[in-house]
Amino acid sequence: MRYWLMKSEPDTFSISDLSDRPLQTEHWDGVRNYQARNMMRDDMKLGDQVFFYHSNCDVPGIVGIMEVVKEGYADFSAFDPDDKHFDPKSSPDKPTWIMVDVRFVRQLSRTISLKELKQHPALADLALVRRGNRLSIMPVTAEQWAYILALE
DNA sequence: GCCAACGTTGGC
DNA sequence: GCCAACGTTGGC
């Protein structure tokens, strides 16, 4: 089993939005970055555990845990001309963009902020704290996962 | 295939 | 709202 971190702006889609969904499940649509796409397409498997990260907000940080419940499939938001993430180059026959479904597991008892994560030498290799990293989906090692959860 | 211009992300 | 750091686009 692998571990991941996925970012979302809470104004757009927050951890509470996820837990309010039917079956507490949602498809992670709208990712339009090839590196992130490739991870969802090739590497994310059923049962993988994922940190939910709130970005672009008062206190950016990890707020909860979710689980992959459906592996990569066509991101249909790319087919809808009215969708913000419409991409005319993507078609149902040959989808350019891929998404997975995730299910709410639990909220953390507190937000583990980006600021705090940056202070731990053990997490220096975490993609999130590397300078200039803008990937919205990134791998987390088992060691990093356990270390971060122990901070809770 | 280079690279400047442009758009986006996201912390601060 | 600013702006650094990227990724993408498109002219050449």
Image (spheres, coloured by chain):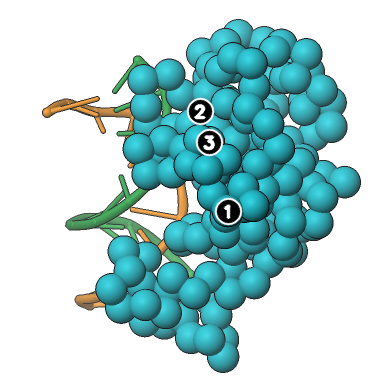
Chain colours: A cyan, B green, C orange
Q: Which mark is residue A22?
A: 1
Crowd rating for badge 2 (residues with CA inside 10 Å; few <14, some 14–19, many 20+):
few
Dot 2 corresponds to which residue?
Answer: A131
Please determine if labels 3 and 2 lie on a single subunit. Answer: yes
| Label 2 to label 1: alpha-carbon separation | 37 Å
| Label 1 to label 3: alpha-carbon separation | 14 Å
Q: Which mark is residue A15?
A: 3
Q: Is residue A96 above or below residue A110?
A: below
Q: Nearer the viewer, residue A8 or A94?
A: A8
- In the rendered image, the quadrant that contains the C terminus of chain A is top right
Of labels 3 and 2, the one closer to you: 3
Q: Earlier in the sequence, mark 2 or mark 1?
A: 1
Residue A132 located left or right of residue A51: left
Q: Are marks 3 and 2 in contact (CB under 8 Å)?
A: no
Q: Earlier in the sequence, mark 1 or mark 3?
A: 3
Q: Is residue A63 above or below residue A101?
A: above
Q: Nearer the viewer, residue A57 or A126?
A: A57
Relative image position of residue A130 (x, y in whole percent): 57, 28
Q: Residue at x 73, y 45 (%)?
A: A67
Q: Is residue A136 visible?
A: yes
Q: Which quadrant of the view contains residue A119?
A: top right
Q: Chain of mark 1?
A: A
Q: Which quadrant of the view contains residue A88?
A: bottom left
Of labels 2 and 1, the one closer to you: 1
Q: Residue at x 79, y 57 (%)?
A: A45
Q: Amino acid at mark 2?
A: Arg
Q: Amino acid at mark 3?
A: Ile
Q: Amino acid at mark 1?
A: Pro
Q: Chain of mark 2?
A: A
Q: Residue at x 46, y 81 (%)?
A: A90
